[in-house]
Amino acid sequence: MVVWVMTGIAVWHFAIFLPDRFWGGIVGAFGAAALGSVVFGLLVAGGDISDTSLVTALQAIPGALLGLAVCWFAGVRREESHA
């Protein structure tokens, strides 16, 4: 699980290239990337946390990206509703 979280945090660093419209700001994006990577990693692994490998780290990347996307679109939607 540590590998999934660390991979999610590594992907989170690329959020600097997007406008800061994340729900909860950059801290919300951090949580979304970490949570998304763990949830997706558990889904792909079938709920089994076993030995780590390079594949384990690669499993977390789509989850982190999905978490960031959900957080960003939620922030955009919230921003538009306040305008």
Image: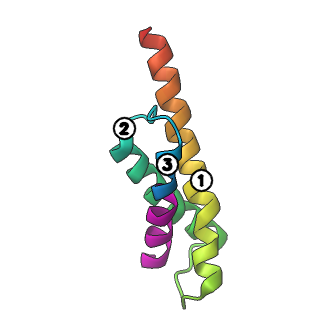
Q: CA distance from mark 1 to mark 2?
A: 16 Å
As drawn, 78 above or below 7: above
Residue at image coords 53%, 62%: 37
Amino acid at pointer 1: Leu
Residue at image coords 44%, 63%: 9
Q: Which residue is mark 2?
A: 25
Determine whether the residue tagged by mark 1 lies in a helix, strand or loop: helix
Q: Position of residue 60 (x, y in %)?
A: 58, 67
Q: Which residue is mark 1?
A: 65
> Reading the chain from its start, which is encountered first: label 3 or label 1?
3
Considering the whole magenta stretch, tell me its main secondary structure: helix
Residue at image coords 52%, 61%: 11
Q: Which residue is mark 3?
A: 15
Q: Nearer the viewer, residue 41 or 21?
A: 21
Amino acid at pointer 2: Gly
> Reading the chain from its start, which is encountered first: label 1 or label 2?
2
Determine whether the residue tagged by mark 2 lies in a helix, strand or loop: helix
Amino acid at pointer 3: Ala
Determine whether the residue tagged by mark 3 lies in a helix, strand or loop: helix
Q: Position of residue 38 (x, y in %)?
A: 50, 65
Chosen colour scheme: rainbow
> Reading the chain from its start, which is encountered first: label 3 or label 2?
3
Q: Quadrant of residue 42?
A: bottom right
Q: Please say if the residues under marks 3 and 1 sit with CB atoms less than 8 Å apart.
A: no
Residue at the extreme bottom of the image, as rendered = 51
Magenta region: which residues?
A: 1-12
